[in-house]
Image: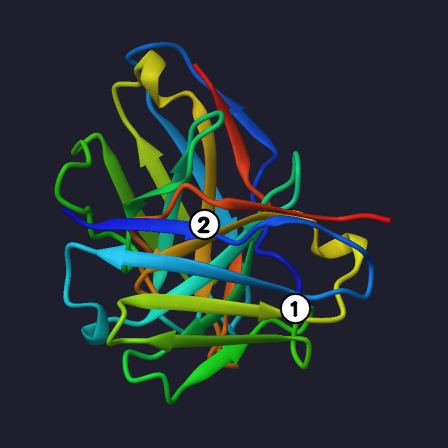
Amino acid sequence: QVQLVESGGGVVKPGGSLRLSCAASGFIFSDYYMTWIRQAPGKGLEWVSYISGDGRITYYADSVEGRFTMSRDNAKNSLYLQMNSLTAEDSAVYYCAKGHLGLGPWGQGTLVTVSS
Amino acid sequence: QSALTQPASVSGSPGQSITISCTGTTSDVGAYNWVSWYQQQPGKAPRVVIYDVSERPSGVSNRFSGSKSGNTASLTISGLQAEDEADYYCSSYTDRSTSLFGAGTKLTV
């Protein structure tokens, strides 16, 4: 069945960088758009970015535009989110999800904490 | 862009029906039939219960239904069960080719 497993979260200082990964299995990865969504502790969901199946199309939320870069390696069935210039407002659980309109399924998430 | 507008909370008794609204603008909900709804139970990842306004994924109970009128989408859950207690989020595609979530609604059964 479809499985998505995020990794790469952790504690990082303000201004620092982090790269998240999402390993996909159980479907033809290159056929699907993929999306990153985040959820700050105790808060709601926030759409972050999506990428087309061939990696040529990406869109970002205003809150991360210019700081985050989404990419994928279809040979490795993997999705990435490079996060730079991190601030406390970027602290959240980051989820990857299959698709870009009706999102599903979702991974279990990886926690990013930005703190000095 | 501002989040889509949802009520903070709704409640209902077992067996009853409830409806959660999701209000956007002519740039998102009103412009496209790409509204989806997500259920998130405590400590778990969200799962989609409705996509494309009213389509139900396989495995989701037919007690869940969706609709849209103008700039407002709605999720209706009939025959409420204790297991339906969760946070519910709507999402819509926008005219900037991005997506937007609602702030979420806590359903108490």
* Front-lying residue, A48 or A72: A72
Q: Separation of disc 1 and disc 2 at Cα?
A: 15 Å
Determine the residue positioned at 48% across, 25% down.
Answer: B42
Report the number of numbered marks.
2
Q: Position of residue A19 (x, y in %)?
A: 56, 64
In this picture, is B15 found above or below A3? above
Q: Amino acid at mark 2?
A: Cys
Colour scheme shown: rainbow
Q: Quadrant of residue A26?
A: bottom left
Q: Position of residue B88 (x, y in %)?
A: 45, 37
* Front-lying residue, B34 or A81: A81
* Front-lying residue, B107 or A22: A22
User: Which residue matches tag 2?
Assistant: B90
Element carrying mark 2: strand
Label 1 Cα neighbours within 10 Å, binned few <14 / some 14-19 / many ≥20: few
Q: Which mark is residue B1?
A: 1
